[in-house]
Image (spheres, rainbow, N blue to C red):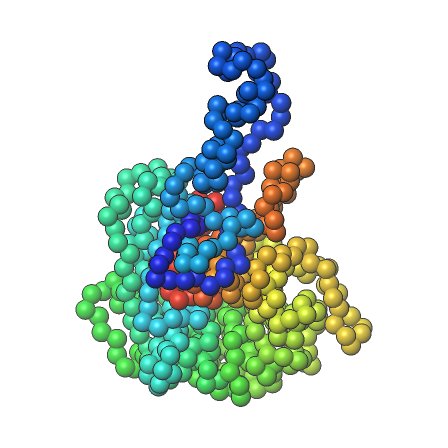
Amino acid sequence: MSKRTADEDAVAGPLKGGDRPDAMDIDEKPNDMGDFEDEFEDEFESEDEVLETGVDGRPDAEREADEAAMNVDGTTGGPATFIVGRTKLDPGQTLAPDPTTYRMLHNLSTPWPCLSFDIVRDSLGDNRSVYPATMYTVAGTQADSRKAGDNALMVMKFSGLSKMDGEEGEDSEDEDDDDEDADPILESKSIPLNSTANRIRTHQSRSSQDPSRLSTTITATMTESSAVLIHDITPHLASFDTPGTLITAQQNKPLSTIRAHRSEGYALDWSPLHPAGKLLTGDNDGLIYQTTRSDGGGFVTDTRPFQGHAGSVEEIQWSPSETSVFASASSDGTIRVWDVRSKSRKAALTMQVSNTDVNVMSWSKQTTHLLASGADDGVWAVWDLRQWKPSSSSAPDKPTPIASFDYHKEQITSVEWHPTDDSIVAVAAGDNTVTLWDLAVELDDEESKDTAGVQDVPPQLLFVHYQKLAKELHWHPQIPGALVATGEEFSVFRTISV
C-alpha cells in the first residue's frame, strides 16, 4: 500500500497501478434509531433556513471546501492514500509505502541490479515467525559496463529483518522478540562471471544419513553468452556462519558448463522430483535441452533438443507431481506440455494462450492441475490443465482460462503461486508494481455496490506494492507470507493481508 508524498527532486513516471482500498464502512440504509431530538430546533426558525445554511450549521461552500481537503480515510492534512482507479500522481509526486499495511518491509541494495534470483532453503526451520528474520538467496548481476569480471553470481544472507514498529506477532513467541532496534544486514559472497546472468535457479539435495538435513546446494545460471553454468555454492553458504572462512578460487569455478545452446536464453528449471539433479534449459531459438546429473556427480546433456516453439522459450517448469512432464511458455504465445519419454521430442499439448509473448508461468504446487501465465500485454491468467486436450489440427487450440485479469498495463515479468495456499498468487509487472491476488474472493451483490466506485479494480486484488523496475519475485518457502522481489533493488516484505 502507498501514500502520496511530494518530492521536489524526483518526478515519477506514469503509474498504471496502485492500491485497492479497504471497503469503506458506509451505511446507506435508513436510520433505524427511532425518534430523536432535533439539535437545530432552537437555533433556526424554519426548515428553509436549515437547508440554506447546511446540515452541520455551516454554509455549504465552507463545508464543501473542507470535504475537498479531507483524505479518503477521513483525516485532513498530510499525505493522502493512493487509490487505484481514483487517484493520479501529480507532477513532482512519488509514492511512499504505508507502514500500517505491512508486517515487515525492507529494501536492500546490491552493487548492480539483479534480473533474476532464487531463494535458498535453510536449516533454520519451517513455518517460522520469529523476528528478526534471516534468509538466504542467490542472484546474478547485470553490470552496465558488461566487462568480463564485472558481473558476478552473488550468494547472499539477509539478516536483521525486523517486523514493523508496533506490529504484533502472530505467535506468542513473537511477543518476546527484541527486534525493535534491529537493522537489516546484507552479507554476500561473489563468484565472478564473464557474462550477464539472465536467469538463475537452485537445486538442493539432502543428506543420505539424515534426509531432514540439506547437504548440497547447486545453482544453474543462464548467461548472455549462451553458456549455462552450474556451481556448487554449499561452501559459500556455510561461510556466513563460520567467520574467517575463505572461499578458494577452485570453489568459485563451475562444476560444469553446458554449451548446447547457440543463442542466449531465459528459461531453466530443476526438477523437484529428481534428488540428484535434472535440469531443463530453453533458448531464444525455441530449443529445449535436458541435462542430468549422473551418480558419479558429472552432468550429461542430451544433444537431442525438444523443439516445436516458433519463438523464444521464455519459461520452463517441471510438473510438481509427475517426474517426466514439463511445460514451456514462449514468445509465440503458446504454452506447451511435454513428456521427456517421447522419442519424437514433440509437445504432447500445444495451447495458444495469448496473442503476445508469454513471458512467465507458474505451476501450482498445491493443486497441480492449475497453471498461471503472464503475458506481454499485461494480462495474467489461470488455466485448468484438465481442460486441455490433444488436438488433431495443426493449429494450436485456444483454451478458455478459469480466471483472467487485465489489470496491469505493462508486461508481466513474474508470477508465482503461494507455496501453501492455492488461491493466493503474486504478480510482478513492468508498471513498477508487485500485486497480491486472492482467487477465492467473490463479492455478493451488496459488496459489489460498495466497490462500484473504484473502476477497473478486480475484487480479487488484495495488495499493491511499489517496486521500481520489478523483474522477479518469490515466496519464501519457510517464512509464511514473506515475499522477496528484485528490481532496482531487493525488496523483502510481508503484508498484513497474507
- Looking at the image, residue 63 lies above or below residue 198: above
Q: Is residue 165 visible?
A: yes
- Looking at the image, residue 338 lies above or below residue 284: above
Decide if residue 237 is on the left or right side of residue 414.
Answer: left
- 376 or 26, which lies in front? 26
Counting from the top left corner in percent of width and height, residue 257 is at 44, 84
Decide if residue 350 is on the left or right side of residue 82.
Answer: right
- Looking at the image, residue 405 lies above or below residue 70: below
- 171 or 41, which lies in front? 41
Q: Is residue 462 visible?
A: no
Counting from the top left corner in percent of width and height, residue 462 is at 53, 48
Counting from the top left corner in percent of width and height, residue 261 is at 53, 85
- 40 or 243, which lies in front? 40
Q: Residue at x 55, y 20 (%)?
A: 49
Q: Residue at x 66, y 80 (%)?
A: 310
Q: Residue at x 55, y 25 (%)?
A: 52
Q: Residue at x 53, y 74 (%)?
A: 267
Decide if residue 93 is on the left or right side of residue 159.
Answer: right
Name the image quarter holding residue 323.
bottom right
- Looking at the image, residue 22 lies above or below residue 457: above
